Image (cartoon, grey):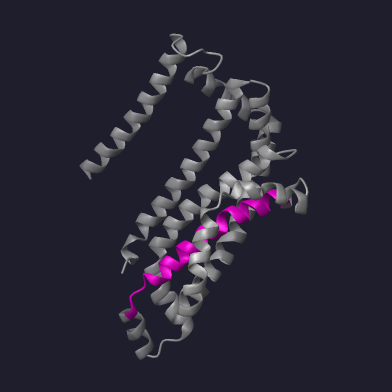
Amino acid sequence: MQSGLVVKAARIAIVVALFAIWEILSRTGIVNPRLLPSASDTLSTLGELLQRASVRKDLAVTATEVVTAFALAVPVGALIGFLIAENRYFAEVAKPLLFFAFSIPKSIFLPMFILVFGVGFSQKVGFGFFSTIFIVIMSTTTAVESVKVEHLTVARSYGATPVQTAFRVYLPSMLPVLLEALRISMIFNVTGVILAEMYASRDGIGHQIATWGENFQMKQLLAGVVMIAAIAIAFNELVRWVETRCSHWRT
């Protein structure tokens, strides 16, 4: 317990130290304040931005796109990954192709999404889905393969139905791996949606960040980066908390 508190205190100290270094570099002029506004000015600007209705609206738009893409990619990717892992022949054929597809930078396909879907909600959700589904498929395949054959044999020998096997053997064994996959998938998902907004969009926080960058509004730009980072870290820690609560399900 005490060691856990020490670790948390060390993490907080590192974050505070990074902000302090940021503040000193800007205030002392070691780095041009026009290029790197101080941490205090950036946080003050962040507070002002959050009071603007337009910024809150853009955050809501981005959140809707991220949640929609995630809600579509996770079940579809999990189903495909499960089917691949359960069929040995299909797995031998499909897994190398998945690795090839995963290694290709997804951003090169963004113009195709704009041509197909136009500039709007479907284009951003589609690209977020595309950026996320491969990692979900690969993670689910790994999770299914991590289930011990002995557990499946015992369950089936006692007459467990496919539904019972899924919820009482597969799910408890796979859950820790799947929760880790959710954290990683959300990173790809948010990155895909933000990138689509920055590339071609009329709304969304990514569009705002791109506009601030083009107009050399560095305080707003850095405030937007801090805003997205804080949201991503909060989601990451939430999933980590759920993962620790489910750690007793490991088999």
Residue 163 sits above or below residue 129 on the image: below
Query: Is 130 on the left or on the right of 92, as rendered?
Result: right
Residue that sits furthest to the left in the current view = 2
* Residue 175, percent from left and from top: 41, 64
Q: Quadrant of residue 116 in the image?
A: bottom right
Query: Is 115 on the left or on the right of 9, as rendered?
Result: right
Tell me what residue is drawn at x 52 percent, y 56 percent. 102
* Residue 45, percent from left and from top: 58, 22
Q: Nearer the viewer, residue 111 or 160?
A: 111
* Residue 20, percent from left and from top: 39, 20
Tell me what residue is drawn at x 58 percent, y 30 percent. 224
Tell me what residue is drawn at x 63 percent, y 26 percent. 213
Query: Is 27 on the left or on the right of 123, as rendered?
Result: left
Residue that sits furthest to the top in the current view = 28
140 magenta-colored: yes
Residue 24 sits above or below residue 98 on the image: above
Tally of numbered discs: 0
Q: What range is drawn magenta here?
A: 123-149
Q: Quadrant of residue 58 in the image?
A: top right
Tell me what residue is drawn at x 55 percent, y 52 percent. 104
Magenta segment's dominant SS is: helix
* Residue 74, percent from left and from top: 55, 61
In this rendering, does residue 72 appear at all?
yes
Quarter holding the C terminus? bottom left
